[in-house]
Image: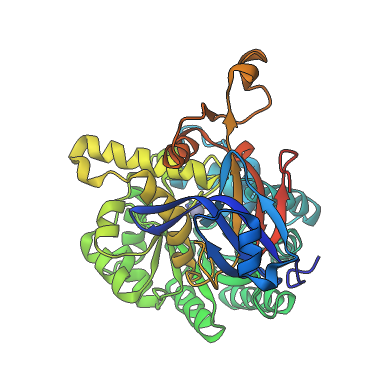
Amino acid sequence: MAASARIKPTIYLGAFVHSVALKELELQEKGAIGVDDNGVIAFVERDVQSIEDVREKHAAFKEADVVEVKDGFFFPGFIDTHTHAPQHPNTGLFGQTTLLSWLQTYTFPMESSLSSLPLARTVYTNFVSRTLSHGTTTCAYYATIHVPATNLLADICHSLGQRALIGRVCMTSSLSPPTYRDASESSALADSLASIQYIRTLDPSAILLHPIVTPRFAPSCTASTLSSLASLASSTHSHIQTHISENVSEVELVRELFPECTSYTHVYDTAGLLTPRTILAHAVHISPAERHIIRERGAKISHCPASNTALTSGCCAVREMLDEGMTVGLGTDVSGGFSPSILEECRQAIWVSRFRAMGGGDRVKISTEEALYLATRGGAAVCGFEEQVGGFEVGMLWDAQMVVLDVVDEERVGERGGFEGKGGVDVFGWETLGERVQKWVYSGDDRNTVAVWVRGRCVHRTGRFKG
Ligand SMILES: Nc1nc2[nH]cnc2c(=O)[nH]1
Ligand SMILES: [Zn+2]
């Protein structure tokens, strides 16, 4: 089905939960959300007594389908603001490496092999399906340097129905391996432009797809390439994504490679890469002065805690960033990160903040509510989509997931404990909706995400979905 095809107006009935502010979730037990044939939320009703009342009030929904959630709730689709589709076969493989040795040992060889289109098709189909199954409705992807494989990733997101930013990776510096490097700056620019044009042709109204200019990181590009890519993003009105200050040795390398700049942030600022459409991943080792520049330029931060722990990169100062008004979302950073799940990333953001707290005070702790905000509204703002997705409001798009938790009772517990074939969350019936959400965040996984919609179109469902 084409992404723009009309869908049947539908009323989503039952509990819903979404962020209304950084520290506040709305927990509605008896909701009804009407979604029109364009996938746009037409109404949000609370404390609903009956479906008949809802149909009565909204004449256009008299004949609408009804999808009801039982033992769970609707939640906005997750937004992954930073991941690498071609690295997915390496998920879980990082050994004892840190960033620079990890790139050489695991990452560049894997990415280089995706010049093979059959392999790229297998890996990308698997990974996009996998992220959808975890409730990720919007994803900012790095592809590889190869134009055909990057365009194939766009095709796959388009046909599987995921909202995506897709970037051909640029690497012109001699520090990149000779076998996996752009031949020249001019070929890098031409290839990036070719991919931008392909994505714009595939989805001219940007219903789902957006190109994103992707200098890998400062050590992969010359100063001239960084500036040229900033100009390309500006002339094509494209987003930009890159990595910044992830690891101490990387920061030292940038200091050596760009001696004329006072900081890593200064390198990107000099090139003109810090814009309101820029997503900077990591930012673990940046100073308050660098944070100030990034905020002034309107650039956004993708916090990738699982990756930062796996590669022992460090603990990002998320509390300070939020206090200072920076825009922050979450990124899985597969395969620096070991999971394609943004729910896992919520847990990891919470854990990393607690490790920081153990050394420096409770103030830096990220709460469950804040983590869920970063996973949805925060991520939407990082991508510039905050008017369209991330919450349940009239005029926004139905990018959502149905979360179902397993109720344990006297009868079911007799069947070998009552959890075989179920998810990891046991609910006993007395929990409030808020407690159910907490249990989901700490023990839930893709088994609890029984259906996923993007723009009103169902893009994933499990056998447990009764739609
Ligand atoms: N985590 C991570 N950091 C990088 N820095 C440059 N390239 C990469 C990458 O692929 N992953
Ligand atoms: Zn990354």
Name the one closer to the observer, 96 or 467: 467
- Report the side of 364 relative to 334 (left or right): left
Which quadrant would the N terminus be assigned to in this image?
bottom right
| Image coordinates for residue 49, horizontal then vertical, percent | 56, 53
| Image coordinates for residue 337, horizontal then vertical, percent | 50, 43
- Report the side of 461 relative to 318 (left or right): right
Residue beneath the point at 48% across and 53% down:
331
Q: Is residue 83 above or below residue 1?
A: above
Residue beneath the point at 42% across and 73% down:
223
Coloring applied to the structure: rainbow
Quarter assignment of residue 37: bottom right
Name the one closer to the observer, 47 or 163: 47
| Total numbered circles | 0
| Image coordinates for residue 50, horizontal then vertical, percent | 61, 54
Residue 382 appears in view: yes
- Report the side of 230 relative to 111 (left or right): left
Pick out the residue farthest to the left: 361
Q: Is residue 361 above or below residue 184?
A: above
| Image coordinates for residue 79, horizontal then vertical, percent | 53, 57
Residue 182 appears in view: no
Q: Is residue 217 above or below residue 358?
A: below
Q: Is residue 336 above or below residue 194?
A: above
- Report the side of 233 relative to 466 (left or right): left
Pick out the residue farthest to the bottom: 235
Residue beneath the point at 26% across and 40% down:
356
Name the one closer to the observer, 290 or 347: 347
